[in-house]
Amino acid sequence: LWHNIDGAEQNRAEGLAGIAQFLEATEEARYEAVVRTPSSDGVVQQHALYARFRGGLVLEAIPACLVLTIRDGRIVRLDEYIDSAPFQALSRA
């Protein structure tokens, strides 16, 4: 798992731990306006992220894109592109 916000690359366990941490910090999180497009080696997913954090902060319609590389029916790589501005505001709050 790679993400553009920090340029970090994570293995499966680290990625799952990060997702768990995000979900623990939110009361509600969902993808909206999901569009999936097949690619030559996987799929590209475009969506808007919505999250309501404990304490009341709400992030709405954050544009994001996942580029998934699939081999033998399994995801072998995931590149996440997300607008970092709302998360920078979150870290300042």
Image (cartoon, helix red, strand yellow):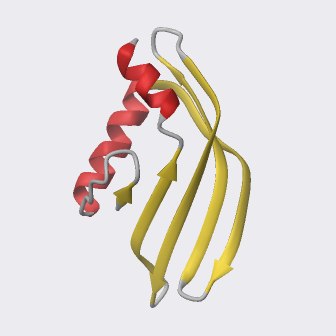
Residue 31: percent from left, percent from top: 64, 44
Q: Residue at position x 58%, y 56% from top?
A: 65
Residue 54: percent from left, percent from top: 46, 15
Q: From the viewer's perspective, is residue 6 above or below residue 77?
A: above
Q: Quadrant of residue 74?
A: bottom left
Identify which residue, 4 or 32, lies in the foreground.
Answer: 4
Instruction: Report the quarter where the N terminus lies.
Output: bottom left
Q: Quadrant of residue 42?
A: bottom right
Left/right placement of residue 6 relative to residue 42 reads left
Identify which residue, 77 or 81, lies in the foreground.
Answer: 81
Left/right placement of residue 15 relative to residue 58 reads left
Q: From the viewer's perspective, is residue 41 above or below residue 23?
A: below
Residue 51: percent from left, percent from top: 56, 29
Residue 32: percent from left, percent from top: 71, 44
Q: Residue at position x 43%, y 21% from top?
A: 90
Q: Residue at position x 51%, y 28% from top?
A: 86
